[in-house]
Image (tube, grey):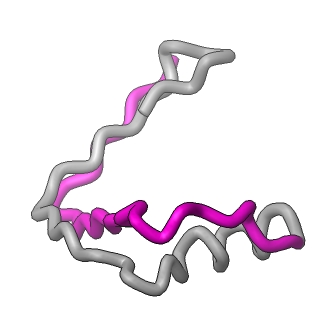
Amino acid sequence: MFETGNPYHSVEIRGTAEIVEDPGKSLPKVLSRKYLGEDPPPEPGEVIRLIVRVTPERVNTFSV
């Protein structure tokens, strides 16, 4: 990840990733309520949501 205001400040996370389905689409609801205070717009039923969980094994930061 790079900070757009300072491209010399970055973070790299390395680890094992797991991809799981979110059949109830609960993650967008949780995040939208937390950051926007409201539910996200409705999505068509055929949209499949996936969650990528990363178990960090190494975290590197760089800043100038």
Q: Is residue 30 left or right of residue 45?
A: right
Above or below, 22 against 51 in this view is: below
Quadrant of image for the N terminus:
top left
The residue furthest right is 37
Res. 11 image quadrant: top left
- Residue toward you, 41 or 45: 45
**Going 23% across and 75% down the picture, which residue do you hit?**
20
Residue 5 image-quadrant placement: top right
Q: Residue 38 at what x, y percent from top left?
A: 86, 71
Q: Position of residue 59 (x, y in %)?
A: 28, 51
The residue positioned 54% from the left and 62% from the top of the image is 44
| Magenta region, residue range | 38-64
> Residue 30, relative to residue 63: is it above or below?
below
Q: Position of residue 7 (x, y in %)?
A: 52, 13
Name the side, left or right, on which 21 lies relative to 35. Answer: left
Q: Is residue 30 above or below residue 40?
A: below
Residue 12: quarter of image: top left
Depth order, front residue of 56/27: 27
| In this rendering, position of residue 64 left or right of residue 56 | right
Q: Closest to the observer: 24 or 27?
A: 24
> Is residue 56 magenta-colored?
yes
In-front residue for pair 23/32: 23
Look at 68% across and 66% down and name the residue there: 42
Query: Residue at position x 57%, y 25% from top?
Result: 3
